[in-house]
Amino acid sequence: MFKNHLKIAWRSLKKQPFFTFLNTFGLAIGMAGGLLICLYIYDELSFDKMFADADRIYRINVDVKFGGNAEEYSEVSAPMAQAMKRDYPQIEVATRFRNLGSMFVRKSDAELNVKEVGITYVDTTFFEMFGLDLLVGNPKTALKEPNTLILTKTAAEKHFGISEALGQNMILDNRDTYTVVGVIDDMPENSFIRNHNIFIAMAGNEDSFSTEWGNHNYPTFIKLRSGSDIKDFDTFLESALGTYVIPGVQNYAPGITEEQFLASGNYLNFSTIALTDIHLYSNRYPELSVNSDVQNVYILSFIALFLIILASVNFMNLSTAHSLKRAKEVGVRKTLGSNKSELIRQFLIESGLISFISLVLAIIVASVALPFFNELAGKEISIPFTNPFFWLILLASVMLLSLFSGSYPAFFMSKFKPIQAMKGIAENNIGGGKIRNSLVVFQFAISIFLIVSTLVVFQQLKFIQNKDLGFTKDQVLIIDDVYVTENEIASFKEEVQQLSQVRSTSISGFLPTPSFRGNSTFYREGLKDDHEKAINMNDWDVDFDYVSTLNLEIIAGRDFNRQFSTDSTAMILNESAVAILGVTPEKALGMRLSSDYGEDEVVFRTVIGVVKDFHYESLRRDIDALGLSLNNSFGSMAVKLNAGDFSNTIAQIETIWNRISPGQPFNYYFMDESFNTTYRAEQRLGRIFIIFTILSILIACLGLFGLAAFNAEKRTKEIGVRKVLGASVSHITYKLTIDFLKLVGIAILISLPLGWFAMRKWLEDFSYRIEISWWVFVIAAFLAVCISILTVSYQSIKAAIVNPVKSLRTE
């Protein structure tokens, strides 16, 4: 019987190729889009689950407010891990990282350096914590001795080869020699340490033995024993301030008590986050790798769901509309003895056949589109063709989709009464007009919602790109790692400054680009022990040309000046720092601040200027307090260029570099490019919105096109009568189009408020954001109307210009 139903279904689909094409193509597009998004979501949800006992591993976080500045850190102090392991017996193992970022690396017998990113100190418990095995080396002794390191497989192959790496010496940053004691497999792309290639023994890091509780530099992980509850540990952490931190800061803050600390409006709260939640739920400073946001997963989940539902709605709409042609078929079948269940089974098999064909097309489309999608999403996703579970999920989803899509048409058509259907009486009321119209409204409401979302996302991105950041980011070349020029730094800067296209240069390890930040607590002169008047702020070491090169605006006082010898102990604050001091910019001038609270001879810095606040962090964050001081910090050199041939100037700078520091890699980037990478996630989200908005509109238009064709065919004789009675083509086109425009109008009224609410919630993640403009909704509504008119008008005009003699021939 099933074989017979399948044959009939296939013949039915072949007899109506236009209907079959619309249904199959619409479903295939929806499935392909949904499949790609589902693969993306699966990848996002799989982060860090590959590690052994991942469900028992947690990172300790800390939220700190002190000196008017509030921070959320992913790192805690050096002694935290040992103290927790000692005092909380439910902890099975604890381990720490100390991220070093990028460094120059070379073999001991090589002259040329290679820049490696993702270098970090780790404790010896690193392997036990994450269940990692060595490909080469002894896990019992690895990383126990200072100046030893572990390479990933890729790093080992790059420098030595896996089997030859063991025992080799490497020189880092032209200073320290390390011995390779092991090789591990590459870190998975969906792990929190995916970009780390070199792991150095923590035993060689003197700071790791510090008992200082005031600094937060170590990402610290704990693994609980089986059966332990993390909530109990979180409760234990509530007492950490009084038990560990306050006693631990007595050397530089004598006499302070927990009550005094809290009474001043300060806080220091420890918490935990599950290892498997870090990627989607943590956006603290700093993360070992760039994280995503669970909000994006929710957004893409809704888009995938919308695409599938839109495709299903198309099937329902077109099937119920097409039921007009099949009413007599149903009547004949019932007259010949077919019962309701047989008819339902027949139509469901037709639905399943269309769904299966659509699935095959969807897999082909997804396979072709996957490389472009990976580039768009910044992923390395592949379709798991060899995974049986993937096919099981896919086939189960298709079966559910075919049931969902085909159930209404099947049950609806099986209700036809045979006598009425065969006489054609049912022609005026079959097709489920109200439900069909509701589905059209639903389709266009989703499409308009996505149009609104896309416009708002790109409006926010344009706002970010065009916002006055308080510094000049255009035409500023950043040269990395200038410290390798060693004693020739001054000569390098001077020679670059002499180039005709160079306006100014500045050397500093602190730039308003994604980079390491360092906070320090300052006290006013005479208020060393008054912790309520302390100010916690970023403390940047810069040179004399920093302010002028970045074009920071001085609103009070002056810039650093080589003619003033006292500027060696001077400081420039930003507006946020002055606000914490509780004075005006003018009154801040001359204030003396010191962070040398542990020294007998305190060194004070005198405030000589105040700069306007500038955005050195993401626009998601408020601007924090900042102080600039003259000091040597040789991380990078900023080169302000005049307009012209940048490539020629860069080549000239590289020539100077190669002469002064031969064998050292020359790395550079433009500051505006670095700024844009900060918002790469939003840019990707915007592009994804555009693509899937277009797909949703395409699917909606396919359905509308089919319904317009059905509507025109249904009203063929009416159109003929109207033309005989003198109706013009434009009048008939209007009559055929206006009904659909009413449905689009209802969709507009539903979707615009929903779009406004959803995007307002999305914008709340940004401290600096747009107000959603009224024209966004006008454009979305206008596009929806235009698209619907273009879709419907073809069929309407085609029907309107038919010779009325042909339309009325059967009367």
Image (cartoon, rainbow, N blue to C red):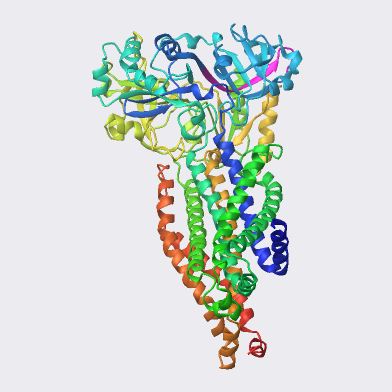
Q: Residue at x 56, y 93 (%)?
A: 725
Image coordinates for residue 94, horizontal then vertical, percent: 49, 15
Image coordinates for residue 201, horizontal then vertical, percent: 58, 12
Give the left or right position of residue 140, taking residue 87 as reference: right
- Of residues 312 and 666, the one nearer the viewer is 312
- Of residues 102 and 638, the one nearer the viewer is 102
Q: Which residue is drawn at 30% across and 23% down?
A: 534
Quarter of the image holding residue 610? top left
Q: Does the magenta stretch include residue 73?
A: no
Quadrant where the C terminus sits is bottom right
Question: Height in image: 608 above or below 250?
Answer: below
Q: How many labels does the image show?
A: 0
Quarter of the image holding residue 604? top left
Give the left or right position of residue 406, taking residue 284 as reference: right
Quadrant where the N terminus sits is bottom right
Image coordinates for residue 767, horizontal then vertical, percent: 40, 42
Q: Which residue is drawn at 66% across and 43% down?
A: 645
- Of residues 337 and 321, the one nearer the viewer is 337
Considering every residue shown, the one lying at the far front of the view is 337
Q: Is any part of residue 52 visible from this angle?
A: yes
Quarter of the image holding residue 136? top right
Image coordinates for residue 202, horizontal then vertical, percent: 55, 12
Span shown in magenta: 97-111
Q: Does the magenta stretch include residue 100?
A: yes
Main secondary structure type of the part rendered in magenta: strand
Give the left or right position of residue 247, taking residue 91 as reference: left
Q: Is any part of residue 530 visible from this angle?
A: no
- Of residues 418 and 764, the one nearer the viewer is 418
